Every structure is written in structure tokens, then in C-alpha cells.
Amino acid sequence: MKFWQNISTRSRSQLALGCLLLMLLVTFTGCSGAARAESWPGLLVQADILYVANIDQVQAFDVQSGETLWTFPAEPDAKSGFYSTPVLDEKRELLLVAGLNDQTVHALRLGDSHDQTPGLAWEFSGAGGQYVGEGVIAGDLFLIGNGDGKLYALNLADGSLAWTFATQDRIWATPLVVDELVYVASLDHHCYALSLESGAEQWRLGTTGAIAVSPVLAGGHIWLGNFGDQIYQVDPQSGAVVWTFEGGASWFWATPLVSESTIYFADVGGEVFAFDIASQELLWRTSIDAIFRGRGVFNVDGTQLLLPAHERGLIYALDAETGDRLPWGEVLENPGRLPGNLVTDGERVYAAPIMISTRVQAFAVSNGRELWQYPVAEEK
Amino acid sequence: MWDAIVVDPITNLLLLFYSLLNGQTLLAVALLTVLIRLAMIPLTIKQQKSMQQQRKLQPKLKIIQEKYKNDQERLGQEQMKLYREAGVNPASGCLPLLIQLPLMLGLYRAIIRALAATPLGLLELAPHIYRVDWLPNLSALLPLQSQFWWLDLALPDPYYILPVLVVITSWIQQKLISAMTPTTASSKDDQAQAMTQSMQVTMPLFMGFVSMSYASGLSVYLVISNLVGIFQYYLIGQSDDDDVAE
């Protein structure tokens, strides 16, 4: 109190003002409005190597041990950030990764041995926005959508631009290539069919909401969901809507899973739907208190669906036939969040949580037991 | 709790305006800001009236301060007596502020949230959208169309036009506020005056910094909010001058 009385009037007012500004600063910056380093890590498993594009690096892991084989760039760079899942071009031995903030596609030339750090084959930095969706390889082209609303077709040989196609909003979905057509969904509420050779538009389908789901082919038709809570079955040649499901209750954002006769959609509100591909009949519908954004996987014999729940960080196992929940895995002490896709090599299922220190987890597909994690957990 | 009571309703109201205004994000932000500021006018007037009443008491307060300058305890008692007799509560100016501040911060958060620029931001927004039969499907409107002229409303203004406007309008508003603040020659009021003067410079700069760092949709909100505030304080100032003239 004496200290307060001793300091000058001016100092007091400056101190009070400083406190007020500090309070405002904390309020503003604590409200998640500022740009933050973020990603939902993309996973790819191929030939006993797990590739992870994460918040600040692309890493390769030995699937058995979880040992890190190499990282790109060598030092973590939080400014880059990755949403887009890596894509492997086996023919040219390239790993294609696209950055969120550096807005660049990097083609990494994989070495002869697994643990050899890849060199840079080429880069493409001609896009004007962030890369969020995964790309796809079609012949000699790499197709990837961008936040500037364009689909880019790059020549895999040297990264040069073959063609582009502009939509009216961001492209966050992975394009689908069937024969000579490319199907690309945009947040502008449309799905477009383009010529693979030239990028010329063949047809477009307007829907009731933004489309962030990657279209899939099932039973000879294109299937996609949107932010208007609807699912569309579309004729791939004409773009005519064959059937629409309007009973959804939330956004469809996770890429659907397709089995021989059934297609499964999980939505952001926690509903999971199973449709007969041939008859469009709703086989079952189940509700879970979760947010589903990432694509799930099947277990080895296709009898179970494993779905990543974003907010709870849990992986749910459902009976593919009935939709009943099955016991799988254990509740982790600190699970993080799971917005990204799961991948499996048949033996293990891999997840990449965010908002915790653990970057990668490997579980046994059969029972969900955790096999390894990266970085290795500290001994208690 | 804070989200459910304050931020979620404002977020959904913003989406409803966006829907009614045919997908014009900037207009929706502007309309919501104006409406919220207008809704707060009774509180602002109450606050200003309290300040005016205190200002009218200043001559008497000055006499009391002079009279009891060596007896702080008595000074306090006499001041309270004067306030009581005049029916003025010196703390009543703070109550409206306590109601306004959460609303303005809620509006700020709603704008930032609704203008989610990244997939993760959008995913986090989804559970906060109302899904009721009597409203249009608001979630189908997302993500909001954020392009407006040179601006992407979800990102900071690259040409610093809006931050400059924020600084100028904040400064004018602060100037009008300080013109209404009661002034006397006592040492305590020196302190208040010094504080007011510092605020007059520091607040606009701080707001300019916020505007440069955050989504330009927020800057739109700040500029419109300041303009409404300037108009409001100007009108109140006019009526105050009329009172003095009478």
C-alpha cells in the first residue's frame, strides 16, 4: 500500500493503463483468432514405411519399431505446416508433399535405402493458396486442389504445370480419377467432371452445401456428401443425380468407406450410415457422441469399421454388418485429437493425434493395443 | 458456458444475417455490429448520464476537497454525502460497462470464429451451429464467402487500410469520451486525467495492432463499432451542451 502511495500519479495511471491493455491483449490473443501453427497430419503406409506429413516436418518411420528413418526438412519448420497427405509415385520413386503455408508442392526423390534422406526432385510454387486436400496420381500427372480454388495438374517428370481448372472457392477434397475423367469437389458447392488430358469441364453438379468430402466410386457411380447434410449418388458420365439422401443431420466431411456391397458415411455430428450400394437402402444408422472428420479403415477381414473421433481422440470400432459398437483398444490417458485419416497395413492401424506431444501412434488392428508411439513416451 | 450463453447466439445470428443478406459477409458483420451497438444504447446513455451528473457535482466536490484537504476520512464522508443527496452513485458508470464488455468480446469472438480460414477452425465451429426446424440450415452456409474487393475477410488486411481506419476512428471516439469525463484540479483527478490522456493515445494504437494481427472481418467490426460510438457520443455531447446552455 505504501509503495502505491509513494509512486507518482503519472506512474500510477500508466501502470493501471498497462494492466488494462495486458488484460485486453490476453483476452484477444486467447480467443484463437490469431494465425496458429496447425495441421491434421496425413499418413501413408507403403512397403513397411509409414510416411507422416505433420505440423512442421515430413517423416518416415519403420512400421515395426516406430524408428524414425528420415525427416524433411531436416529441422522442424512450424511455419510450413501440412494438412495434405503425402502421395507416393512408385514409378518415379517420388514422395509428393504439399505445404499448407508455404503453398508449395515438394517432390522428394526417395533413396535406394529406406533410411536415406530423400533429395528434392522438383518443387511447384505457382499456387496462390494453401494445400489442404490430398493429391492423386493419374498417369504422368499429379493432380491436387488448392486454397486458391484451382485444381493443378503437374507433370510428374519435372513439376511443370500441365493445366489448371478454376472453381469459385477453395478445394479441400482429393480429386477422383476414373478412366479419362477427373472429379473434383469444391467448397463452392459444386462437383466438377474434367477431362484428364486437358482439364476441360465436362459437367458440373450444384449441391446444397460446400463439398469437402472426396468423391468415391462405388457400384459404377460417384458418391459424395456435403455440408448441406446430404449424400449424392451421381452418374459419372452425365453428372445426373441418381439418388439423394436427405436424412443427414450434420456435415459429411469424412471420405466414405466402400466395401463390396456397402458404402459407409460418418458425419461431423457423430452419425454413421451404411447404405446398400446397389439399392441405396439404408442398412443401418448409429449415433455416437463424437465428431467424425477423418476417414476410417476396415479391419483385415472387413467385418469392422475403425473410425477416428476428432474431439475425443478415440478410435471407435463398429460391426460393419450391424453398426453395433465393439470393444477395441483402450482409453488412453491423454489421447489428443484425431481430425486426420487413419491408415492401415492390415496388421497395424496408424493415427496421428494433434494438440499433444505424441505425433504418431500404431495400434494392433485386431484389438487396438498400442504398439508404439512417436516420440517414445517418457517412463513414469 | 461463455460460449453457450454469449458467443454461440451471436455466431448464429451472424449466420442468419449472412443468409438473409444473400451471402454478403461484410454486410452481415456490419448489420450485426450496428444492431448490438444500438441494443446497448440504453446502457450507454445510463453511463453517460451518470458521468454528466458527476460533472455537474464537480464545483461542489471541488469546494469539499479544498475544505477537507487535510482530513481524508472526512473528505470521503462528505463526498459520499454529496453523492447521496444528489442521488448519484459514483459506481453506476461501471455497471453498463460490465454488461457491454462481454457482449462486445462475444461479438468479436463470433466474427473470428465464423470466418474460420482453416479446416480445423471450421471443424471446431461445426458443433456451435444451431440446428432447429424454425431456422434455415445455417451450417450449410459455411464456410462463409470471405472475399470482398481487395480483402479476404478471414485474413488481415495486406494493405493496412482497415488498421489505419481503426486507429483514426478509435482516436476520435476516445477524444469524445475524454471530453465528457468529469475534470477537476485535485490530485486524484490529475490521476484520472493522466489515465484518460494515455488512453486517448494508447487505445487507438492497441486497436490498430489488433486490427493488423487478426482477420479483417474483425477490423470491419471495429470500424463500424467506433463509428456508431462516435455518433452516439456526439449526440450525447450535443444534448449535454444544450443542458448547460439552458
Image: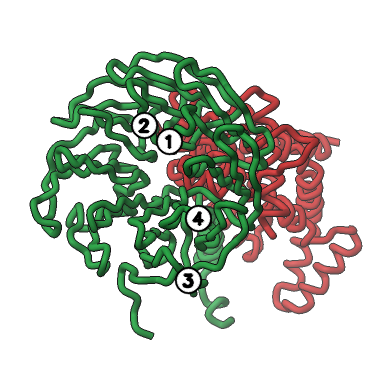
Chain colours: A green, B red
Q: In this view, does A256 lie above or below B78?
A: above
Dot placed on the residue nearer the N-terminal end, 4 or 1: 1
Residue B243 position within the rendered picture, expressed as x and y whole percent measured from the top left: 83, 38
The residue mark sitting in front, 4 or 1, is 4
Residue tagged by mark 1?
Answer: A173
Label 2 residue SS: strand
Residue tagged by mark 4?
Answer: A303
Residue B45 position within the rendered picture, expressed as x and y whole percent measured from the top left: 79, 44
Dot placed on the residue nearer the N-terminal end, 2 or 1: 2
Mark 2 touching mark 1, by CB under 8 A?
Answer: yes
Residue in the image at 44% along x and 61% along y: A355
Location of the N terminus of chain B (image quadrant):
bottom right
Subunit of mark 4? Answer: A
The residue mark sitting in front, 1 or 3, is 1
Cα gap from disc 3 to disc 2, whole angstroms: 34 Å
Residue in the image at 71% along x and 72% along y: B69
Dot placed on the residue nearer the N-terminal end, 1 or 3: 1
Task: Report whether A361 appears left or right of B135.
Answer: left
Cα gap from disc 2 to disc 1, whole angstroms: 7 Å
Cα gap from disc 2 to disc 4, whole angstroms: 33 Å
Q: Residue A97 carries which label?
A: none
